[in-house]
Image (tube, grey):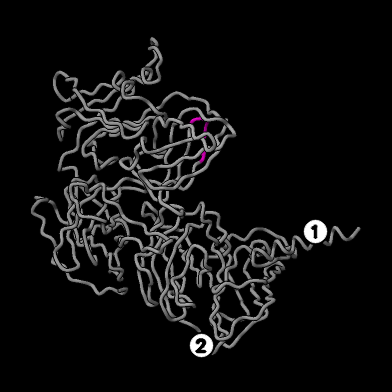
Amino acid sequence: MKRPTSILNAILVLLALAASGCASDAPPSGGPTDPQPREVLFSDPDSGSVNTSPSKIRLLFSHPVTARQLLYAIHFSPEVDNYHVTVNGNEGEIVFFNRFEANRTYILTLNKSLLGNYTLPFATGAKLDTSSISGSVQNADLSPAASAFVMAFQNPGTNGSTPDMRNDRPDYLAQTDASGSFHFSHLAPGSYSLMAFDDSNANMRWNRSTEAIGLSCYRAVPVGSKNIALRLTGPDADHPGIAACRPLERQLLELTYTEPVEPADIDIKEILIHHAKTHKPVPVLDWYSPVPASASTKIRVLCGPLKTGEPYIITDRKAGTNKVLFYPTRFTAEKLPISISMTPADKSSPGYMNTVWPELGNTAVISFSRPVTKNAIRSAAVLSESGRRTPETLEYALKQIDARTFSMQPTAGFRPGAAYTLSIDSAAVNGNPPEESVRTTRISRFTAADTSNTGGISGTCWSPRGPVIVEARASKGALPHRVPGVQKGRNSFSYAMTGLAPGSYTISAFVAEDGNEQELYRQKWRPGTLTPLTPSAPFGLHPGNVRVRAQWMAESIDIDIMNTAPGTITPDSLKGGSRIRSLRNQQQPSPQKPEPSVQ
């Protein structure tokens, strides 16, 4: 009767070894939880030890840990297989079944989910490698990627070829801190290809199908380089376009793209659905963004009837050639009443008209909780200029951005400083008859902002080439304000951005694929590809946020695309502010070319 148990135990051991190690626990001593952060009090071997090839590593923690916690928090650079983890309260031990390679530097990294950014370097030879590469990782919206890891692959590899970052094991791994910064501190001499990934499940391993990646703008980064910037986009895919399709309801699909998409990128005529066996097409009716007024990798598509349990294929011919197989769901959500939000909000004085969709200029934006039609809005919405003695109802242009979001603008445009009232009958939008004594009208009363209510930003962008596009984002995920950089020197481009609402902005720049200024908002930052390895387009980020104030120009807000260390900037600072008298007469600082650290 012991044989089945032995077989089961063997299977469990093999499964654990498949995860590069196995673990066993001894119960902790108990007691109240210590609120202090966990730290390593002692290690054997010591950090920085040389001429050592340990058969085991001992760690003493300030707080108790479990064997499972420690096992899933371990990563070795270069990777090490076949080890066992044992924990007894505050003490952990990693026992190795194979010897380390001679004359190599190894780094034990513990995931910050267990312990801050902890590394334990040691060398089997007489010398510890000390070369370094540092930089930062941003999310697609340029917020810090605090849950990212960066993989470094030696380039050229051991056989002299370019590394296959999709399939090869990384030579080194580093994790970002809360600001998105990373630092490799014990690299072997040479150059490395870098790839960042969003470790959304905190297992220190890249999940190709679900976790976003980011590439450097260099094929190989030499050691000693600083401020290397990587930007996460979408999951990896063999071809650009749709990476995944998740049915949410019977006729509602959520699509994930390989890179962020904006409203102008979507053409429902190019999104095709057909049955995988019969090839019968399914009509695509409309689409909308899950988060209004943002550029993200996800959109939602409304389509015709689908047969539950049957296979379907979807593709977006405009975005790329990827074809994705999916199976519909039978779930149907309860239809709640449509809610309405408007920008500018009620009683806004001044009301800023270019904050939601900067590309559209001065417009009011109406957002609904569910898709609606233009006809429904026209029958329910009234726009009037209310600052006059007799309010005047205005003719307006209505533009659909997606199925839930619309822009509205008077035929003659909004007059700066004028007062307006926008009212929408929610009962009419919902298709309900009006009810006596029940107020169903949503109202936004606002005064359109003028130049005295806005500020600006100016500076220099250092870039190895042009054309350069400079962007200002008011918040996480917001669509950017854009201006083209004007070349002033060999590697310098000046810019000035005016008409900005007061607030905090993230300032960035990228090298565009072409220089057609008539299509400023159609320019794309190229994220690069893994196969074949193609670096991303150069981009840079001004450190910290920039505060914009009414009637002030924030000057010398410089952006470094050339990946050299810029001067220290206090976050949320107003650098070199001056009172605006005439924004058109602002003089740009004379640029001086910095020295690039990466060629």
The part of the image, by quadrant, that contains residue 450 is top left
The stretch of residues the image draws in magenta is 246-251
The tally of labels here is 2
Q: Earlier in the sequence, mark 2 or mark 1?
A: 1
Element type at mark 1: helix
Residue 291 in view here: yes
- For the point 45% across and 36% down, the residue is 273
Q: Which mark is residue 93?
A: none
Question: At numbered mark 2, what does the secondary structure look like: helix, strand or loop?
Answer: loop
Screen quadrant of the N terminus: bottom right
The residue carrying pointer 2 sits among few (fewer than 14), some (14 to 19) or many (20 or more) residues within 10 Å by Cα, namely some
560 or 33, which is in the foreground? Answer: 560
| Residue 378 vertical placement versus 364 (above, below) | above
Q: Residue furthest right?
A: 1
Identity of the residue furthest to the bottom in this view: 126
Outermost residue toward the top in this view: 436
Q: Is residue 137 magenta?
A: no
Q: Give the left or right position of residue 116, taking residue 592 as reference.
A: right
Q: Residue at x 52, y 64 (%)?
A: 167
Please state which of residues 476 and 417 is positioned toward the viewer in this rendering: 476
User: Tag 2: residue type?
Assistant: Lys
Q: The disc labelled 1 sits on which kind of residue?
A: Leu
Residue 8's disc is 1
Q: Nearer the viewer, residue 152 or 377?
A: 152
Image spot of residue 123 (x, y percent): 55, 83
Per the model, the C-alpha gap separating discs 2 and 1 is 45 Å
| 248 falls in the magenta region | yes
Residue 221: image location, x then y, percent: 38, 72
Location of the C terminus by quadrant is bottom left
Tag on residue 127?
2
